[in-house]
Image (spheres, rainbow, N blue to C red):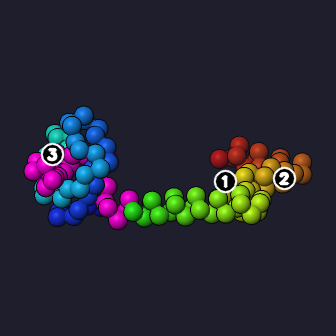
Amino acid sequence: MFKLGQRVVIVADSFEQGLPLGEYGYLIARDRNPDSAFAWVVRIPKIDKQYPVVEEDIALEAKLLEEEAERISREALLDFALATRNEALFRQLVGLQDEEEANDEPVKESVEDFIRKVNMKAWI
């Protein structure tokens, strides 16, 4: 997923090393030692330090920007649905529409189909 030299953002501090959360850094080395918990070494130019990190602690800048754009567009659509009282759009955004459709259509089987399914499972 990551390559050497990529610009990343520190998003977590799993091992409580005092990582500067939200700061940019560059991947300068990969730790291939199987006994080490750390996968990468990140250089943070702003504070002029290097830290060993695990992959869960870093994220690509482009990925974070994409997630933020999706979140903002979803919130804007939700505000629009509430302002225009568009119930269908609101239910779609919140996810209520899928649950209601699943509850509206109960599965009805004939006795023969049920017996056939039980026999097939018993055969396996």
* Magenta part of the chain: 39-64
| Residue 55 visible here | no
- Type of residue at label 1? Val
Amino acid type, callout 3? Tyr
Q: Amino acid at mark 2?
A: Asp
Q: Residue furthest left?
A: 48
Figure check: 100 above or below 2: above
Which residue is at the front of the view, 57 or 1?
57
Residue 57 magenta-highlighted: yes
105 in magenta: no
Binning the other alpha carbons within 10 Å of mark 3 as few (below 14), some (14 to 19) or many (20 upward) gives some
Can you identify the residue that label 2 sits on?
104
Q: Where is residue 19 shown, x and y percent of the image? A: 22, 42
- Residue that badge 1 annotates: 94
Q: Which circle's residue, 2 or 3, is located before the other in the chain?
A: 3
The residue under the point 32% across, 48% down is: 11
Task: Please tell me which of labels 1 and 2 falls first in the chain.
Answer: 1
Quadrant location of the N terminus in the rendered image: bottom left
* Position of residue 43 measured from the top left corner of the image (x, y, whole percent): 14, 53
